[in-house]
Amino acid sequence: MSRPAYVTTGRWAPPVPARVVAVTSADGARLHAEVHGAEGAPAVVLAHGWTCSTAFWAAQVRDLAKDHRVIAYDQRGHGRSPAARAYGTDSLADDLVAVLGATLTPGERAVVAGHSMGGMTVMAAAGRPAFTEHVAAVLLCSTGSSGLVAESTVLPLRAGPLRTRATRSVLGARAPLGPVTPVARALLKYATMGPGSAPDRVEACARIVHGCPSGVRHAWSRVLATLDLDAELARLTVPTAVIGGTADRLTPIRHARALAAALPNCVGLTELTGAGHMTPIEAPEAVSAALRELTARHLPARQAAPAAGTAPAAEAEKEKTP
């Protein structure tokens, strides 16, 4: 089945990057990364969630690239990053570290935002030396560190083993999602977005999610079903802000509150009333504003441009076209 096309007009259409970087992770997996905005501007790195892609960050890229350098990448198997042999939290951490090394100069620091599985990526990588070298601050959006399936309220059942098993089965289904139909949009809105989400936002999310290959969706669902990154939170010592939606069924707001309480250096918890799981699309202004605040506080207004010959070696693999 061919992947549905993303929306092509309006604020949800993916912006054209200034350049594309082909990144190679530790196990040889290939990752698609995009750079938007001016070289030398404060850097923001965006890690999307399960079944999404760089297109998920269209609103943030379009806003922040005016005065930031915005780096977005496709998690392995998503978007333009090919499927890989390994899927796990170590793979998530390896991939983020590889992207940081390929797109930032030695010692250059960035603000990193992770949505859903992207937030879990940040937690998994927090103890890596390269993370410490390159990350000045973090924004965690609609994410959690453990208990994801057991605490999900996507299925209207009483909490307990039956709901947990049923939720795992539904989220891990191998069947293709099929075309984006009115029924598909309604189901996706119910499961992942707040009840007041506008049709254009639902359409954008549906096209992104339906574009994820079913095999990749299933492989990552197995990782998320057993996720436990509670111990990694102690290593996430950089200033970290947390955002969650009060109507989130996939990662209910209790996850955001638990993260804010457990983080060594939490600099704020924002609860978005009525928002679901897709906060960067449901509340783009709030997410962009949080990123701007973090860069203003923790990054210089303009970082020095790299001297000739000091660009990361991985930039030699830049692609000429998206």
Image (tube, rainbow, N blue to C red):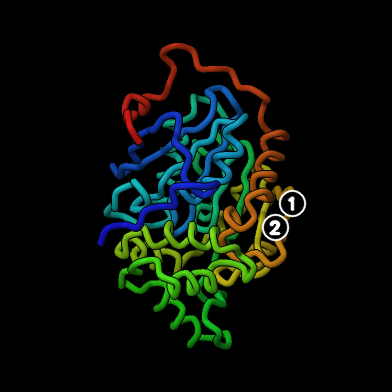
Residue 92 location (% of width, % of height) = 43, 50
Q: Residue furthest front?
A: 9
Q: Amino acid at mark 1?
A: Gly
* N-term-proximal mark, 2 vs 1: 2
Is residue 40 rendered to the left or right of residue 80? right
On the image, which quarter does residue 29 sit in? top left
Depth order, front residue of 321/219: 321
Crowding near pointer 2: few (<14 within 10 Å), some, many (20+)? many
In the picture of the structure, the residue carrying the numbered disc 1 is 268
The image shows residue 289, relative to residue 159, as above or below, that is: above
Does any portion of residue 266 appear in the rendered image? yes
Q: CA distance from mark 2 to mark 1?
A: 7 Å
Residue 77 location (% of width, % of height) = 33, 53
Residue 262 location (% of width, % of height) = 68, 58
In the picture of the structure, the residue carrying the numbered disc 2 is 260
Determine the residue positioned at 55% across, 40% down.
Answer: 61
